[in-house]
Image (cartoon, helix red, strand yellow):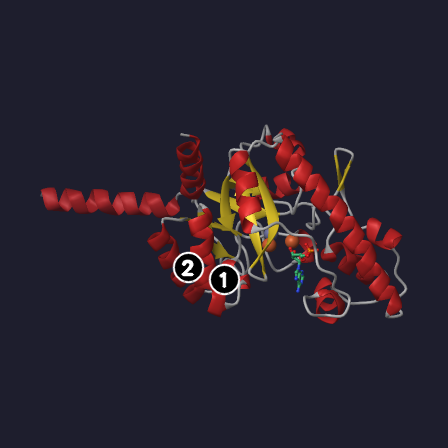
Amino acid sequence: MIGCLTFICGAFFQAWRLARPMARVDLHAHTNVSDGTLTPAELVNLAAKSGLTALAITDHDHVGALAAARAHAIDKGIEIVPGIELSVEEEGFELHLLGYLFDERDERLLATLDHLRVSRQGRAARIVERLQEMGLDITLEDVSKEVGAAAGQEASIGRPHIARALMAKGLVASVTEAFDIYLANGKPAVVAKEKLTAEQALALVHAAGGVAVLAHPVTIPEAHRETMVRRLAALGLDGLEVVHSKHGPIEREALAALADELGLIKTGGSDFHGANKPDVLLGTGRGGNVEVGPETLGALKKRKTERAR
Ligand code: AMP
Ligand code: FE
Ligand code: FE
Ligand code: ZN
C-alpha cells in the first residue's frame, strides 16, 4: 500500500516537474551598443517572449545598454544582470573574459572602457583604409551608419559593423562572407585591437565588485586550452563558460571536468548577436544547444558575496 502510494506520488511529481516550464536565463548576449543588432529595449522584449527570468547583457567594452534595458524590463519580471565582455591578450592568444555583477558606476572600469572604445574607433578607421587600398568603395561614414548609440555615448565599434557596412553596399552577401574574405583573423583587412592582459581584466572586474568568467574557451586552440584555463584560475578566474552555442558535447564534458577540478563555476550563455549571428537564438543558442538555469546565476552571486568578505 505504502509502496503503491509512493509510486503514485512519484509519478505525479515527475509529471509536474516535466510539465512545468523550466526557468531559463541567458548570461551572454549583445545589443547594438556593441556588435549585436537589437537595441537594449528590443533585446529585453525578446527575452520576455523567450520566457527568460534573467538576462546578462555582455556588450564588448560597454555597459551603456544596462540602464536602458533595466528600465524597459521593470514590468516584465526579467532581472537584468550587469555584464561586460573584455578582450584579453595572454601568451599571444586572444581571450574573452566576461565580467558579471560589478558596480556599473565604478570609475576605473568606466575610464578603461572609454579608453578601449576610443582605441576601437582608431582601429576601425585603419581597417577601412585597408579595405579602400584593396579597391573597395567603403568609408568610415558607411560604417558609422551601422553603429548604435546608448544614452548619447558612441557604441563599441567592431568588425561586425564594418561587415554590415560592406553588406549594405552590396560588396559582400553576408556578415560571414565579410569575415571569410576580409575581416577574420589572418585575413587581409584585419588590424589588431587593443587588449588588456588577463591580470588587468581580472583586477578591473574584481575591484568593481564583480566576478570573471572565461568566455567560449573553445576559441583557444585545443593544445593550449587547458594550460590557459589553469593559468587564469591561478590568477583568480571565477568561472568557465562551459555551455555556449559554439561548444559541442565533448568540449562541454572536458570543460566541465576542468571547472570542477579547479573550483570554477560552470556557466553558460548563447552569445546572442541578433542578425549578425542569425543562427544563434537568445536563451537557446544554436539548434537548442544552450540551456542555462537560474541556479547558475545564483552560483555567480554566491561567489561575488564570498569575494566581498
Ligand atoms: P572585434 O571586437 O572588432 O575584434 O570583432 C569581434 C567580433 O566579431 C566577435 O565578438 C564576434 O561577434 C564577431 N565575429 C568574429 N568572427 C566572426 C565570423 N567569422 N563571423 C561573424 N562574426 C564574427
Ligand atoms: Fe561579438
Ligand atoms: Fe566573445
Ligand atoms: Zn560575446
The disc at residue 255 is 2
Q: Is residue 251 left or right of residue 41?
A: left
- The correct choice, above or below, for 309 with respect to 241 in the image is above
- Quarter of the picture holding the N terminus: top left
Instruction: Give the Cα distance between marks 2 and 1.
Output: 10 Å
**For residue 67, what is the image quadrant?**
top right
Near mark 2 (Cα within 10 A), the count class, few <14, some 14-19 or many ≥20, is many
The disc at residue 2 is none
Percent x, y for residue 301? 44, 36
In the foreground, 116 or 239: 116
In the foreground, 65 or 281: 65
Percent x, y for residue 205? 55, 39
Disc 1, SS: loop
Q: Amino acid at mark 2?
A: Leu
Percent x, y for residue 21? 43, 44
Near mark 1 (Cα within 10 A), the count class, few <14, some 14-19 or many ≥20, is many
Circles 2 and 1 in contact, beta carbons < 8 Å: yes
**For residue 178, what is the image quadrant?**
bottom right
- Quarter of the picture holding the C terminus: top left
- The correct choice, above or below, for 120 with respect to 9 in the image is below
Percent x, y for residue 12? 27, 44
Q: Which residue is mark 1?
A: 247
Total numbered circles = 2
The residue at the point 53 percent across, 58 percent down is 245
Any part of residue 55 in sight: no
Q: Amino acid at mark 1?
A: His
In the foreground, 28 or 4: 28
Tell me which label, 2 or 1, sits earlier in the chain: 1
The residue at the point 36 percent across, 52 percent down is 262
Any part of residue 195 in sight: yes
